Image (cartoon, helix red, strand yellow):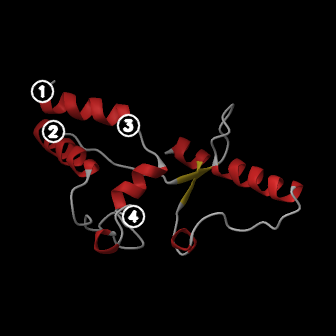
Amino acid sequence: MTSSSANVACVWGANGISGTAMIDYCGVHKGGEYLASCPFTEDSSRHKGLNFYYIQEDLLEEYAGKNNWKYIITRPNVIIGVSKGNFMNFAISLALYACIQKEKDQPLVFPGNEIAWNSIIDHSDALNNAHF
Protein backbone atom coordinates (compact mmCIF):
# COMPACT_ATOMS: atom_id res chain seq x y z
CA MET A 1 0.00 0.00 0.00
CA THR A 2 1.42 3.38 -0.96
CA SER A 3 1.66 6.25 1.47
CA SER A 4 -1.36 8.10 0.00
CA SER A 5 -3.52 4.96 -0.10
CA ALA A 6 -2.65 4.20 3.51
CA ASN A 7 -3.83 7.69 4.38
CA VAL A 8 -7.12 7.16 2.55
CA ALA A 9 -7.76 3.84 4.30
CA CYS A 10 -6.89 5.31 7.68
CA VAL A 11 -8.98 8.47 7.33
CA TRP A 12 -11.94 6.70 5.69
CA GLY A 13 -12.12 4.00 8.35
CA ALA A 14 -11.61 6.37 11.26
CA ASN A 15 -14.35 8.81 10.38
CA GLY A 16 -17.23 6.79 9.01
CA ILE A 17 -20.33 8.60 7.80
CA SER A 18 -22.70 10.65 9.87
CA GLY A 19 -25.22 13.44 9.59
CA THR A 20 -22.46 15.84 10.57
CA ALA A 21 -20.40 14.58 7.66
CA MET A 22 -23.17 15.47 5.22
CA ILE A 23 -23.58 18.92 6.75
CA ASP A 24 -19.85 19.55 6.40
CA TYR A 25 -19.79 18.14 2.87
CA CYS A 26 -22.58 20.39 1.59
CA GLY A 27 -21.27 23.53 3.30
CA VAL A 28 -24.29 24.10 5.54
CA HIS A 29 -21.97 24.88 8.46
CA LYS A 30 -20.49 27.80 6.46
CA GLY A 31 -23.70 29.21 4.98
CA GLY A 32 -24.17 31.82 2.25
CA GLU A 33 -22.06 31.39 -0.87
CA TYR A 34 -20.57 28.16 0.52
CA LEU A 35 -23.87 26.25 0.39
CA ALA A 36 -24.10 23.44 -2.14
CA SER A 37 -27.06 23.33 -4.52
CA CYS A 38 -30.35 22.07 -3.17
CA PRO A 39 -31.32 19.36 -3.68
CA PHE A 40 -27.80 17.97 -3.66
CA THR A 41 -27.37 15.38 -6.43
CA GLU A 42 -24.53 13.14 -7.56
CA ASP A 43 -23.52 15.54 -10.31
CA SER A 44 -23.70 18.69 -8.15
CA SER A 45 -20.52 20.71 -8.07
CA ARG A 46 -18.51 21.08 -4.89
CA HIS A 47 -19.26 24.07 -2.71
CA LYS A 48 -16.70 26.88 -2.53
CA GLY A 49 -13.83 26.78 -0.08
CA LEU A 50 -11.77 24.05 1.51
CA ASN A 51 -13.38 20.86 2.70
CA PHE A 52 -11.81 17.92 4.53
CA TYR A 53 -13.91 15.41 2.57
CA TYR A 54 -12.73 16.72 -0.80
CA ILE A 55 -9.15 15.79 0.10
CA GLN A 56 -10.25 12.23 0.92
CA GLU A 57 -12.22 11.91 -2.32
CA ASP A 58 -9.34 13.25 -4.41
CA LEU A 59 -6.94 10.74 -2.84
CA LEU A 60 -9.43 7.92 -3.36
CA GLU A 61 -10.02 8.90 -6.99
CA GLU A 62 -6.27 9.07 -7.65
CA TYR A 63 -5.64 5.67 -6.05
CA ALA A 64 -8.56 4.04 -7.85
CA GLY A 65 -7.37 5.41 -11.18
CA LYS A 66 -3.86 4.03 -10.67
CA ASN A 67 -5.13 0.62 -9.54
CA ASN A 68 -7.98 0.07 -12.01
CA TRP A 69 -10.91 -0.16 -9.59
CA LYS A 70 -14.05 1.87 -8.97
CA TYR A 71 -15.67 3.18 -5.84
CA ILE A 72 -18.90 4.74 -4.69
CA ILE A 73 -19.45 7.28 -1.95
CA THR A 74 -22.70 7.26 -0.02
CA ARG A 75 -23.74 9.80 2.56
CA PRO A 76 -26.89 8.82 4.39
CA ASN A 77 -27.99 11.74 6.53
CA VAL A 78 -30.72 11.05 9.06
CA ILE A 79 -31.24 7.28 9.40
CA ILE A 80 -34.66 6.02 10.44
CA GLY A 81 -35.07 2.40 11.46
CA VAL A 82 -33.96 -0.36 13.77
CA SER A 83 -30.71 0.05 15.64
CA LYS A 84 -30.63 -2.90 18.04
CA GLY A 85 -29.42 -1.94 21.50
CA ASN A 86 -28.76 1.64 20.42
CA PHE A 87 -31.14 4.53 20.95
CA MET A 88 -29.13 6.90 18.74
CA ASN A 89 -31.85 6.96 16.11
CA PHE A 90 -33.78 9.98 14.88
CA ALA A 91 -37.17 8.31 15.25
CA ILE A 92 -36.49 7.35 18.87
CA SER A 93 -35.14 10.82 19.66
CA LEU A 94 -38.29 12.40 18.23
CA ALA A 95 -40.53 9.99 20.15
CA LEU A 96 -38.69 10.72 23.42
CA TYR A 97 -39.02 14.47 22.84
CA ALA A 98 -42.76 14.06 22.17
CA CYS A 99 -43.21 11.99 25.36
CA ILE A 100 -41.35 14.55 27.46
CA GLN A 101 -43.44 17.40 26.05
CA LYS A 102 -46.64 15.46 26.76
CA GLU A 103 -45.53 14.66 30.32
CA LYS A 104 -44.79 18.34 30.90
CA ASP A 105 -48.21 19.19 29.40
CA GLN A 106 -46.49 21.35 26.78
CA PRO A 107 -47.15 21.51 23.03
CA LEU A 108 -45.01 19.56 20.62
CA VAL A 109 -43.08 22.39 18.95
CA PHE A 110 -40.13 22.23 16.59
CA PRO A 111 -37.02 22.33 18.81
CA GLY A 112 -34.70 23.87 16.20
CA ASN A 113 -34.16 27.32 14.73
CA GLU A 114 -35.64 28.93 11.61
CA ILE A 115 -32.73 27.83 9.42
CA ALA A 116 -33.29 24.19 10.41
CA TRP A 117 -37.06 24.54 9.92
CA ASN A 118 -36.62 25.85 6.36
CA SER A 119 -33.96 23.30 5.38
CA ILE A 120 -34.54 20.29 3.17
CA ILE A 121 -33.25 17.20 4.96
CA ASP A 122 -33.09 13.74 3.45
CA HIS A 123 -33.78 10.61 5.45
CA SER A 124 -32.61 7.08 4.79
CA ASP A 125 -34.09 3.83 6.02
CA ALA A 126 -31.76 1.56 8.04
CA LEU A 127 -32.97 -1.55 6.20
CA ASN A 128 -32.40 0.14 2.84
CA ASN A 129 -28.84 1.04 3.88
CA ALA A 130 -28.22 -2.54 5.01
CA HIS A 131 -29.36 -3.90 1.64
CA PHE A 132 -27.18 -1.38 -0.18
Instruction: Estimate how packed mark 1 is, as few (under 14), some (14 to 19) or many (20 or more) residues with alpha carbons within 10 Å.
Output: few
Residue wearing tag 4: 28
Of discs 3 and 1, which sits in the foreground?
A: 3
Q: Which of the two discs, 3 and 1, labels the residue nearer the N terminus? A: 1
Mark 2 lies on a secondary structure that is helix
Q: Which of the two discs, 3 and 4, labels the residue nearer the N terminus? A: 3
Mark 4 lies on a secondary structure that is loop
Asked whether the residues under the numbered discs 1 and 2 touch, taking CB atoms below 8 Å apart as contact, a structural biologist would say: yes
Of discs 3 and 4, which sits in the foreground?
A: 4
Residue type at mark 1 is Thr
Q: Which of the two discs, 2 and 4, labels the residue nearer the N terminus? A: 4
Residue wearing tag 3: 15
Closest to the observer: 96 or 101? 101
Residue type at mark 2 is Tyr
12 to 25, vertically: above or below: above
Residue type at mark 3 is Asn
Q: Determine the residue positioned at 10% across, 39% down.
A: 66
Mark 3 lies on a secondary structure that is helix
Q: Which of the two discs, 1 and 2, labels the residue nearer the N terminus? A: 1
Relative side of 93 to 24, left or right: right
Instruction: Estimate how packed mark 2 is, as few (under 14), some (14 to 19) or many (20 or more) residues with alpha carbons within 10 Å.
Output: some
Q: Position of residue 118 (x, y in %)?
A: 54, 75
Residue wearing tag 2: 63
Mark 1 lies on a secondary structure that is loop
Closest to the observer: 87 or 125? 87
Q: Which of the two discs, 1 and 4, labels the residue nearer the N terminus? A: 1
Q: Which of the two discs, 3 and 2, labels the residue nearer the N terminus? A: 3
Q: Position of residue 94 (x, y in %)?
A: 71, 55
Of discs 3 and 2, which sits in the foreground?
A: 3
Residue 2, disc = 1
